[in-house]
Amino acid sequence: MSYLRYVRVIGTMHVSPKSREEVIRTILNERPHAVAIELDRARFLAMNENRRLTLEESLRFGRRGLINYVLAKVEEKLGEEFGMKPGEEMKAAINTAQRLGVPLYLIDEDINLILSKILAAPGREKLLMALEALGIFLPVKSGEMADPMAEYRAMMVQFRRRYPYLYRVLVEERNEVMARNLISIVENLKLRGVKRPKVIAVVGLGHKPGIEHLLDRARGRGFLSPYWTEGVV
């Protein structure tokens, strides 16, 4: 049994206004039993507070804080170029789920665990990442991609070649966590008497193919993952 019968995965570009519109339109049209988003509780709460740490504040948390700050600045720069703040498509999913009274689930891996894994990266990958991060304030080419999925595939191939460890941590392992959580959501909905659950998952475009592959190959019943969060709205 393929869990793609029950789960529709929307792959978004975190800084694209079109992604926000697609999320709203799809949830309103599908009227799902559940909406799942690529966040954990810590990032969900931070996004709702709408506050980002300064560099000075981030440094108080050591290397983890610095890595988090750099990643946030990269997204901010892209958001300026594309005319949309990072996470707006996630906020759209949250608000639309609230409007419809649909349960919202947080399915991503805990950010503290992700940062711990990044800190354990081989020295070569950490050095290369640091050097490339120096260019985050350089101008970014704006405008819509002719074929976003093709562009993302090329970026993923390049990222995997340059950062094999980080690719495993940031892409493949998180795909596995999110796929397991989506299976858990489907199975729990069935246990509650929903004969054909309908779940919409909003994730980054780079995660969509991997999650769909895992959902399509899944055969056993789902299980409750430690990262799965229910009832946040």
Image (cartoon, helix red, strand yellow):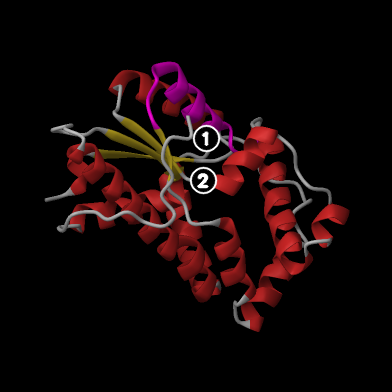
103 vs 56, nearest the viewer: 103
Q: Amino acid at mark 1?
A: Met
Magenta segment, which residues?
85-103
- The residue at which mark 1 appears reads as 90
Residue that lies at the very extreme toward the right in this rendered image: 56
Q: Can I make out residue 86 in this image?
A: no
Which secondary structure lies at badge 1?
Answer: helix
Residue 102 in picture, x, y percent from top left: 37, 25
Residue 87 on the magenta segment? yes
Q: Amino acid at mark 2?
A: Leu
Quadrant of the image occupied by residue 196: top left
Query: Going 49% across and 29% down the picture, which residue do you hit?
Result: 94
Residue that lies at the very extreme toward the front in this rendered image: 192
* Number of numbered discs: 2
Mark nearer the N terminus (2 vs 1):
2
Residue 2 in picture, x, y percent from top left: 16, 49
Query: Going 41% across and 49% down the picture, which residue do you hit?
Result: 228
Q: Is residue 28 above or below residue 32?
A: above
Disc 2 and disc 1: Cα gap in Å?
A: 8 Å
Would residue 76 appear left or right of 163 to someone viewing this image?
right
Quadrant of the image occupied by residue 86: top right
- The residue at which mark 2 appears reads as 39
Query: Going 67% across and 55% down the picture, which residue do you hit?
Result: 71
Labels 2 & 1 near each other (Cβ < 8 A): yes
Prevalent SS, magenta region: helix
Q: Can I make out residue 78 in this image?
A: yes
Residue that lies at the very extreme toward the bottom in this rendered image: 123
Quadrant of the image occupied by residue 129: bottom right
Would residue 158 appear left or right of 226 to someone viewing this image?
right
